[in-house]
Each structure stands twice: as structure tokens, then as C-alpha cells.
Amino acid sequence: HRDYVKKCFKERHVVIKETMKSMYIHFKEGSSEVQREWRNLVTQVDRNVELALRQTVKRSLQELSRAINGDAKTEPQLLFRVNIVLEQGRVDYNPTMINLTHVVNIVAKELISTVAVVPRLREVLAAEIELDASATGIESKAEDKADKYPTFYAVIYDDVDMLKIVVLIMNGMSATATELQKYLS
């Protein structure tokens, strides 16, 4: 599913980039004021993409949290099958809760990393339009080169809301482990 989502993200990014490049024709010959408005438009679209990606990741993490912890309307869902095994005179779960918690932690991190395939629109457009401009003899703007922004992945990975949801997921796994240990005892 992650591969499918990455493919969709890449395809949508290409569509947005190509649309923006085709719009640039109307701004290309404009004054410095018009060029500033173009950069503002690109910045706004870039922000909108970031917001959409942030909401997508947040909803996905919330769904995982809801499945593990439940909420006011739903009980936690059965996500894993564990077996009680007797090995060397000791009763334990297979897979262990440590292994399951580790897997859930990896899933949460990989869920966030899915957005890493989407580059910043500002940088991609600046680079491609600069290449087009240099081919036509138009000088490139120094401010575009100085416009470096953290990746969508870096911004979303460091987001406090995402961290809170991941902590909630891990707390749910810990609570489950405690309940299973009681059952085992």
C-alpha cells in the first residue's frame, strides 16, 4: 500500500509541477512585480501541498491509533494474532509484545516517510525554470537560489502533533502489553 501511495504522490506532484510550469508562461515576460507575484503563487501552492501531506499523515496515524487504542465511539480493534506457547517450561506469547511494538513503531515511521518522495515545489520549479531561463538567455534570480526550505518529510517528521500521535500509539501498545502480561500471569 505504501508503494501505491508513493506512486500516487509522485504522479500528483508531476501534474502540479507541469501545471505550474505551463502557468509560468503568463508570468515569464513580466516585470519584477509580476515575478514576485509568481514566487508568491509558487510559495502558496507549496504551502498547500505541505498542508495536504501533513493532514494525510496525521489522519493515517490517527487511524492507527484508533485501531490500537479505540476512542469514544469504538473499541480497540484486533490487529494482531498472538499465540501462547510453552517453551522450555516457560509460557510466553509468540510473537512477543516487544516484537509487535517494534513493528508498530516501524510502521508509524514508514507511514511518515512516505511523503519523502514529494520534493518541495519551490525548489523543483526554481531549478527547472532557471534551466529554461538560462537556455533563453534570461538571467536567473539570486533570491531563488537562496530560497532553501526543509523537505516535506523533515517538516512533518518534526511536527509536534505527529509526535504526540506516535506517543499515543506507543502508549496503547504498552497498555496492551500490560494487559496481556496480566492474562499470561
Image (cartoon, rainbow, N blue to C red):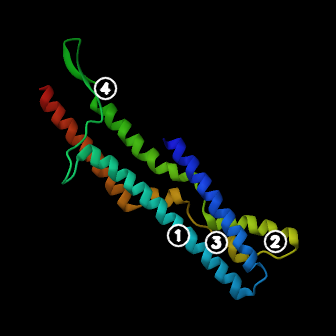
Q: Earlier in the sequence, mark 3 or mark 4?
A: 4
Residue 4 visible in the shown view:
yes
Asked if the residue at tag 1 contacts the one at tag 2, i.e. Cβ–Cβ closer than 8 Å, the answer is: no
* CA distance separating discs 2 and 3: 17 Å
Residue 153 on image: x %, y %: 51, 56
Kind of residue at disc 1: Arg
* Residue drawn 45% across the image and 51% down it: 112
Q: Considering the numbered disc 4 on the image, is that residue within a helix, a strand or a loop?
A: loop
Crowd around label 1: few <14 · some 14–19 · many ≥20 (10 Å) = some
36 displayed left or right of 94: right
Kind of residue at disc 2: Ala
41 displayed left or right of 84: right
Q: Depth-wise, is mark 1 or mark 4 nearer the camera? A: 1
Q: Which residue is mark 3?
A: 147
Q: Considering the numbered disc 3 on the image, is that residue within a helix, a strand or a loop?
A: loop
Q: Earlier in the sequence, mark 2 or mark 1?
A: 1
Tell me where residue 163 sits by quadrant: bottom left
Q: Which residue is mark 2?
A: 133
* CA distance separating discs 3 and 4: 48 Å
Kind of residue at disc 3: Asp
Residue 58 on image: x %, y %: 39, 57
Q: Depth-wise, is mark 2 or mark 3 nearer the camera? A: 2
Q: Depth-wise, is mark 3 or mark 4 nearer the camera? A: 4
Q: Nearer the viewer, residue 38 or 122?
A: 38
Q: Considering the numbered disc 1 on the image, is that residue within a helix, a strand or a loop?
A: helix
* Residue drawn 19% across the image and 12% down it: 89
Crowd around label 4: few <14 · some 14–19 · many ≥20 (10 Å) = some
Q: Which residue is mark 4?
A: 95
Crowd around label 3: few <14 · some 14–19 · many ≥20 (10 Å) = few
Q: Earlier in the sequence, mark 2 or mark 3?
A: 2
Residue 47 circle label: 1
Kind of residue at disc 4: Pro
